[in-house]
Image (tube, rainbow, N blue to C red):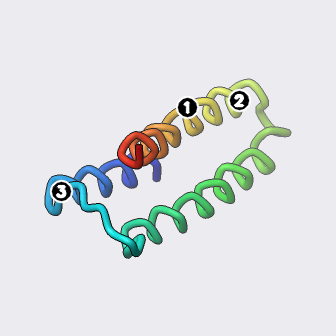
Amino acid sequence: MPLAMLAFILIYISTYGIVRQEDEGTPAHIFQIWMVVEVLAVAFFAVTWFPRNPKQTFIILALQIAASLLPIALVFFLES
């Protein structure tokens, strides 16, 4: 999911460029919905798999969080 969101952001920027506007627009709302879904998906994964196999679950969670920071960092970079 994080890599799909990163691809979405990069495709949007390559198609329309960086547009400053008063209204956030549809891409911003899609990004906000993704953030909520991502947190819920990671929490569900952690709750279901951590008791079964803590070491591998921790590694996957670390990778998932690192991958989630890529699109978030890109959006914060473009906002400033």
Q: CA distance from mark 1 to mark 2?
A: 9 Å
Residue on which the image places disc 3: 17
Q: CA distance from mark 3 to mark 2?
A: 37 Å
Residue plotted at (60% across, 63% down): 37
* Foreground pick, 71 / 67: 71
Residue on which the image places disc 1: 63
Q: CA distance from mark 3 to mark 1?
A: 29 Å
Residue plotted at (46% across, 39% down): 73
* Foreground pick, 71 / 54: 71
Mark drawn on residue 14: none
SS of the residue under disc 2: helix
- Residue 71 location, quadrant: top left
SS of the residue under disc 1: helix
Q: Please tell me how many numbered marks the rendered image carries.
A: 3
Callout in the foreground (3, 2): 3
| Amino acid marked by disc 2 | Phe
Q: Earlier in the sequence, mark 3 or mark 1?
A: 3
Residue sitting farthest toward the left: 15
The vertical placement of 46 against 28, above or below, is above
| Amino acid marked by disc 3 | Gly
Residue on which the image places disc 2: 58
Q: Earlier in the sequence, mark 3 or mark 2?
A: 3
Could you tell me residue 29's position as x and y percent? 47, 71
